Image (tube, helix red, strand yellow):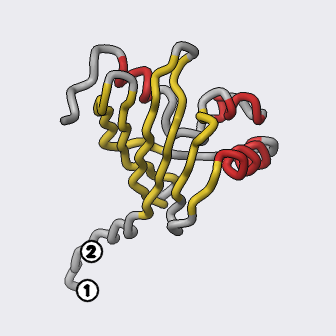
Amino acid sequence: MARDPEPGVTEELRSLEPIFHRVEAGSGREAFEAIASPDFLEVGASGQVYDRDFVLDTLARRHSQPHDDRWQIHDFEARELSDDLWLVTYELDQDGRRSRRATIWRRTESGWMAEYHQGTLLPPTPEPPIPDRGV
């Protein structure tokens, strides 16, 4: 049964998300290796499974060039699954492209390591109706 997070853990994990989107985490492969476990897997929005090396190579290429990555996190939750394993879920809005995200984090002696990440696209938010002005 999931337990409520211990004090401070939610803030620690929030500082690591959205995983791999934060430029301040560093732009080199080494920075990404520091938070991705050796057995890390990602399931992309397409359902495709990506291993650690593929994800790290992709991120190193992405962060090697300047970009204006705008995003917002909504509905962030951290749930303790076991003594050293935590599930983080949230909604990520990247300039109107919305997705539900889930990351499993393991607390180690050297810090937090991501074990698994998944992103699932959400349908676009419908535009509000234009009021009838009686024209």
Q: Judging from the image, what secondary structure is the residue with disc 2 in?
A: loop
Residue assigned mark 1: 135
Q: Nearer the viewer, residue 113 or 124?
A: 113
Q: Quadrant of residue 76?
A: top left
Q: Amino acid at mark 2?
A: Pro
Q: Quadrant of the N terminus?
A: top left
Name the residue rendered at 67%, 34% in the picture. Answer: 32
Give how far across and how far down residue 115 sits, in percent. 51, 38
Give how far across and how far down residue 85 sits, in percent. 38, 30
Q: Is residue 111 above or below residue 75?
A: above
Q: Judging from the image, what secondary structure is the residue with disc 1 in?
A: loop
Q: Nearer the viewer, residue 103 or 115?
A: 115
Q: Amino acid at mark 1?
A: Val
Give how far across and how far down residue 37 sits, in percent. 59, 34
Give how far across and how far down residue 79 sits, in percent. 29, 33
Q: Is residue 9 above or below residue 90?
A: above
**Label annotation for residue 10:** none
Q: Quadrant of residue 34?
A: top right
Residue assigned mark 2: 129
Q: Nearer the viewer, residue 89 or 42?
A: 42
Q: CA distance from mark 2 to mark 1?
A: 16 Å
